[in-house]
Image: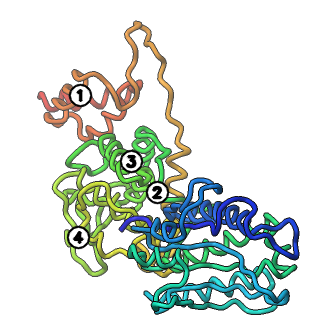
Amino acid sequence: MGKIKICLDAGHYGSSYNHSPVVGSYYESAMAWDLHLKLKAELEARGFEVVTTRASRDTDLAVYSRGAASRGCDLFLSLHSNACGTESVDYPVVYRAYDNLNGIDTLALKTAERIGELMGTRQAGRTAIRKNSSGGEYYGVLRGARAVGTPLYMLVEHSFHTNTAAAQWLSVEANLDLLAAAEADLLAEHFGIRPVPEGKTQIMGQARATVRQMALFCRSKNAAPQLPGCSLEQLCQMFLEEGAAEGVRGDVAFAQSLHETGYFRYGGIVQPSQNNYAGIGALNGNGKGQAATFPDPRTGVRAQIQHLKAYASREPLAGACVDPRFSLVSRGCAPCVEWLGAADNPDGRGWAVPGKDYGRKITAMLDRILAWQVPESPADGPDGTGKPDAGEGPDWQAEGLKVLADAGVVVNPGYWEAKFGEEMTVGEVMGMLGRLLKEAG
């Protein structure tokens, strides 16, 4: 499922069409143009895809063509203010499909009533229909939208510009800001889109942590992660790569994996050999190993990234789905980490159930990863050949480590690999030499 797509139409073209007879500075076309741009920005900020019927306010298009421009959209919205011969009339009205196609009247009525509340109109907002002589839609923009199969369409009259108070209210830019935000909120509620509240941690986006920060923080808690299929650094790199491919923060996913596996100590339902770093399919009451198993570490990381994307976004996957529980998620119900626990989610859904403080624990882990100070290595060593960074080194060092590990001299090769480039203590040297002599004897 992709983004919800909305087509916005600024009613009438130009900057001086439909002059108010009671407020000399007001023109319907100017108000509608400004409002549709503000609404576009508000909708995009909430995760909608938005197209408009015209590129500039001076582009004159036939009304039917404007409606037909909504082909492939989920909603067509044409913005106006109304007019009549009676100055006291001020109710907002939303014209919707004459046959209440797809139950549009509910959204239309909420929109009209909310506009009336904001504007303080004396008469309550309402919905209406209008048919032509052949029984179809009277308004050309609505006929065009219906003809191309747009499932929902509305023409919104923001009160009457023949009413002095209404025209004055619509002339204030700050009031148009209020309208745009309110209408965007109504549409987000209707389509089930939850924007990320201020101060929360978005799941979608670019990772901020580095491989070294992630690996060093993990080893500070567990010097020997149980990762039979790859090194810790390789796993960290996979999280960043797979996250970037789907637009998910790979560092968020890694922090979640640390929480789920106990810094890769495991000990619960999921076993290290399953390459399942987030407990996918590990349900309450399951026995050891009764959870999703993936053929290799990368596939396990990819499944976790995809599962997070299912919660955080309605956008389609970039790659083939490997997450066995992807289709079970209510798409987009948890756009921020803090809502991954059902108990903390306004919608009552989440990765963890009941999951009280589940997301907070992950963000706390992420904060500690990001705060981790990676030691800087000098550009050149004493001999001028350069000194490798911790966890990095030439092939001959890695080969030597493998020989020592195979011989039993080194019991935690991951720990020693992370120390490539660091100084060894006398005690570490004595311990390793003693073990070597013991094995040789």
Tell me the CA gap for discs 4 and 3.
Answer: 26 Å
Tell me the CA gap for discs 3 and 2.
Answer: 9 Å
Tell me the CA gap for discs 1 and 2.
Answer: 36 Å
Tell me the residue at 61%/90% (across/down): 127
Of badges 4 and 3, nearer the viewer stands 3
The residue pinned by badge 2 equals: 204
Farthest residue to the left: give it: 441
The residue pinned by badge 1 equals: 398
Neighbour class for label 1 at 10 Å: few (<14), some, many (≥20)? some
Of badges 3 and 1, nearer the viewer stands 3
The residue pinned by badge 3 equals: 244
- Amino acid carrying label 1: it is Ala
- Amino acid carrying label 3: it is Ala
| First in residue order: circle 4 vs circle 2 | 2
- Amino acid carrying label 2: it is Met
Rendered image quadrant of residue 354? bottom left
Indicate left or right for 163 with 129 as reference. Answer: right
Vertical comparison of 79 with 115: above or below: above
- Amino acid carrying label 4: it is Ala
The residue pinned by badge 4 equals: 291
Q: Position of residue 297 (x, y in %)?
A: 23, 51
